[in-house]
Amino acid sequence: MRTRVKMSSSDASKPKPAVNSAIATALRTLDTESEGMLALAAAMSDGLGAPFVAAVETIRAARGRVIITGMGKSGHVARKIAATLASTGTPAFFVHAADASHGDLGMITSDDVMLALSWSGETEELKDLINYSRRFRIVLIAITVNAESTLGKAADIVLALPEAREACPHNLAPTTSSLMQLALGDALAMTLLESRGFTAIDFGVFHPRGSLGAARQRISRQSGRPAAPRRRRRAAKMPAASRLAARRAQFESK
């Protein structure tokens, strides 16, 4: 139920510093974050372009899935990127960096590609994931602002983000940095989508519910053909027991 607030003419003429201040803060936030996006776009036309193409080609060629990981705000962004990739034709899932060290490393195979997010590149919880990827020759792609960080030096491909100021007045709370990470993840997803020829009908197969699912049904009826997802051809895999024996042999040989 809506509540109407009556204002007299005298109230309407009074200045509203709180509202004006709020709008000013909102505009400053948007301006700061838009500067980060412009810097990211400029980087893509410069040094970021070549490793971005390499990342796309590597993911396209992978026999396994894209494992995306991170901590804190980077972890939240990583979870969203995983969901976007999975719904647009690139099998992917999120592994929490802290949980990985408590058994979830077993979710990751040598056929996978690991995408790790850390603004500083020095996230403590990523160390076991980094070591695991190096030990079992799992391709590691890093999204970080510091190519010379622990993560950056360990990675096979570094998607180095440009320096940017956070929208937080103290330059602390992840705001601009999170937006840039998310935008780069979207760029990866959309590039992969187009390279696979993934259609709106294909998308609907993975998203049968909600308004997007309803739109897919309309497209399917108009096209006159049933929707079918486009799947990558997968190489034949050895039985699970054989893979486990092979991994055990790798451990014993080190």
Image: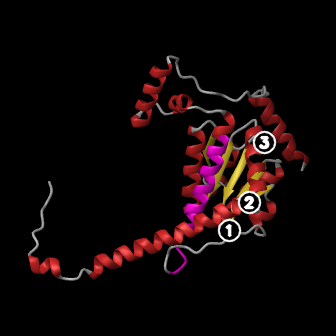
- Measured from the top left, where is residue 195 in percent x and y? 69, 38
Q: Badge 1 is on which residue?
A: 162
Q: Are marks 1 and 2 in contact (CB under 8 Å)?
A: yes
Q: Which residue type carries mark 1?
A: Pro
Residue 59 seen from this side: yes
Magenta run includes residue 132: no
Q: Is residue 4 left or right of residue 84?
A: left
- What residue is rendered at 77% in x and 43% in y? 57
Q: Considering the numbered disc 2 on the image, is that residue within a helix, a strand or a loop?
A: loop
Tell me where residue 137 appears, x and y as whole percent.
83, 48
- What secondary structure prevails in the magenta region? helix
Give the residue type that dot 2 points to. Leu
Q: Earlier in the sequence, mark 3 or mark 2?
A: 2
From the viewer's perspective, is residue 168 above or below residue 52? Answer: below
Task: Assign a secondary structure to mark 1.
Answer: loop
- Report the residue marked by disc 2: 48
Q: Which quadrant of the figure has residue 13?
A: bottom left
Q: Residue at x 44, y 36 (%)?
A: 212
Question: Considering only vertical position in the picture, is 37 above or below 213?
Answer: below
Magenta stretch, residue numbers: 170-192
Choose the circle earlier in sequence order: 1 or 3: 3
Q: Return the x and y of residue 77 as percentages of the image width and height.
A: 56, 56
SS for dot 3: loop
Give the CA separation, mark 1 to mark 2.
9 Å
Q: Is 91 or 197 nearer to us in this picture?
A: 197
**Residue 110: numbered disc:** 3
